[in-house]
Structure formats: structure tokens, C-alpha cells
Image (tube, rainbow, N blue to C red):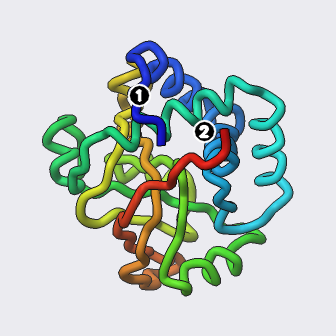
Amino acid sequence: MDDRAPTADQLAAACAAWQGGRDVGSSPIRGGARILTRLPHYFTAEFITTYEQRALDEPSILDDARTLLSALEQSPKRAGDGWQISLDATSPIAKRGIKSGAQDSQILDTLRTGRIAMPLWGVSLDPDVAASFGRRFTFVLEDEFPAIPAWVHSGAKAEEQELITGGVYEVTDMSDIDETTEVRLRWTGHCEITQE
């Protein structure tokens, strides 16, 4: 990983781009992070390939992904309650919902391996925001993990309380609650940039 920290302006711009909307912001940047780390998504789908191709076609997306990966490596690691206190956030639980789709069985297959890699993804410290992304799966972070509070750097969308995070995770528990599979994840390491 590049040891040079991104500038404040670079980080602000990358966070603002991330917050620009899932389909035009965070998802293409996540695709760029997978390209830079050479780590595949945890399920395959045409829309995933489309995001990754867009990142290849637009250098600014790869630049934002590189900025966030580098900043994440240098960010502090805190448990959820630590992030809550430091950011005056709603909840000590950082999580993200995922809606149901054709990929459900692939997600389950990946989770059953006991490990999942997500170079970049977003969680929220507001339970309503986390649930708004879907209720088929809920990914919950345990113990300490690195994160970038997007709104602190962009100055926008503070109500979303979104933490940009990422890495390799151990699946510590899976349980079905009604129609939701709650997945507890423990961060075990960064995803390194290997593609320049």
C-alpha cells in the first residue's frame, strides 16, 4: 500500500463522490477498489461487472478508490461504541442491510466459507439507514475496525452516519431472524492495492 496519506482535499472529494448515490457513486468506486486489489466481488452478477467496467473506463473512479483504500489503511480502528462516541452517532452498532435478489444463494455460499473480502463498502451507525438498503441480510461489524466517516470529510449527508470501511472479515456468526439472515463479521486485515 502507498504510505503517502491522501490530502484533505482528495479525501473530501472521494467521500463526496462516494455519497453521490449508490449507482453512480459508491458502487462504481467499490468496483474500482476490487480492480485495484484484484479481489473479486463476493457474488457474480451482470451489474457488478458493469460497475467494474465503468471504473476501468473512468480514471477518476479508480483515483477515488485508491484515495479511500489508502486513507482506510491509515484510519483509526475502533469498536462500534468507540465510533459512536467519537462521532456523536445514533448507535454503537455499525451495520448494513442487503436486499434480496438472484444473488442470495451466492452470498450464502460465500458466507459459509467463514470468510468474506470487501475492499470497500459502507455501513451506518443509524439503524434505520442501515435497514433501508434491504432486509434479506444484515451485516454487523464486531470488535475494532478501521473506517472513514464520510460526512466528516465531505461535509454532506451527516444524517446517513455512513462509515466507509473495508477489508477481510471472519464470519463469526449467522442467524436467521424472521426473513433476515444476520451476519456478524470481525475485521482481520486490509485489502492491499496490487494493481497500479
Q: Position of residue 26 (x, y in %)?
A: 60, 38
Q: Which residue is mark 1?
A: 4
Q: Is residue 31 left or right of residue 92?
A: right
**Location of residue 74 by image quarter:** top left
Residue found at the very far top of the displayed protein: 9
Amino acid type at image mark 1 = Arg
Q: Which residue is mark 2?
A: 26
**Residue found 36% across the figure and 64% down from its top:** 187
Q: Is residue 156 among the parts visible in the rendering?
A: no
Cβ–Cβ under 8 Å for marks 2 and 1: no
Q: Position of residue 41 (x, y in %)?
A: 67, 61
Q: Is residue 38 left or right of residue 68?
A: right
Q: Position of residue 172 (x, y in %)?
A: 36, 80
**Residue found 85% across the figure and 57% down from its top:** 46
Mark 2 and mark 1: span between their CA atoms? Answer: 23 Å
Give the secondary structure at mark 1: loop
Structural crowding at the residue carrying mark 1, measured as other residues with C-alpha within 10 Å and reported as few (<14), some (14–19) or many (≥20): few
**Viewer-nearest of discs 2 and 1:** 1
Amino acid type at image mark 2 = Ser
Quadrant assignment for the C terminus = top right
